Amino acid sequence: MNYLLDTNILSDARRRSSPALNNWLSQQRISELAISVITIFELEKGVQRLERRDNVQGRLLREWLEHSVRTTFSRKIHPVTEEIATVAAGLHVPDPMPEMDALIAATALVHGMTLVTRNTKDFNQISVRLLNPHEL
């Protein structure tokens, strides 16, 4: 099975805040994991904000993003294609959802992947397969 990791899963994994998540991740093959370019956007935005406030912590987070995330997923970062954009737009009808969530969910749908997220309630109204490893 292939999994698309939501941004919160990478953040939680970095913090090692959940033994259940750490256990689940340790059992997965990296070849079956991927992220959306939207996750890169969200992580990059967080890193740049932290770098402006706290240079030391910003540098640590930058190193994690560059050496852990970008290196690990270098060939597994899905772009937003025209098809993904179209599917994401359809997820707003009839109930609007945040654009970034819609783009991540649409990426999972288009690629036939399970979306791995802590925030399953944010995606319950759509037909994407969900997994919350915090609850395993």
Image (spheres, grey):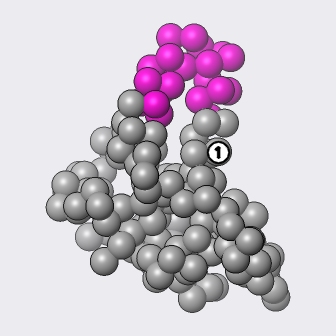
Side (left or right) of 16 relative to 117: left
* Quadrant housing residue 70: top left
Q: Find the magenta span and give its range.
A: 46-66
Residue found 44% across the figure and 76% down from its top? 113
Q: Callout 1 environment at 10 Å: few (<14), some (14 to 19), or many (20+)?
A: few
Side (left or right) of 92 relative to 115: right
The amino acid sitting under disc 1 is: Phe
Residue found 17% across the figure and 61% down from its top? 27
* Residue 123 versus residue 104 in the image, above or below: below
Quadrant of image for the N terminus: bottom left
* Residue 112 versus residue 6 in the image, above or below: below
Image spot of residue 121 (x, y percent):
56, 74
Image spot of residue 64 (x, y percent):
42, 30
Asked if residue 101 can be seen in this view, the reply is: no
Instruction: Please name the residue that numbered disc 1 is placed on.
Output: 41
Nearer to the camera, 49 or 71: 71
Nearer to the camera, 118 or 93: 93
* Quadrant housing residue 110: bottom right
Image spot of residue 132 (x, y percent):
39, 69
Side (left or right) of 18 relative to 79: left
53 magenta-colored: yes
* Residue 43 versus residue 22 in the image, above or below: above
21 magenta-colored: no
Residue found 62% across the figure and 85% down from its top? 126
Residue found 55% across the figure and 80% down from its top? 109
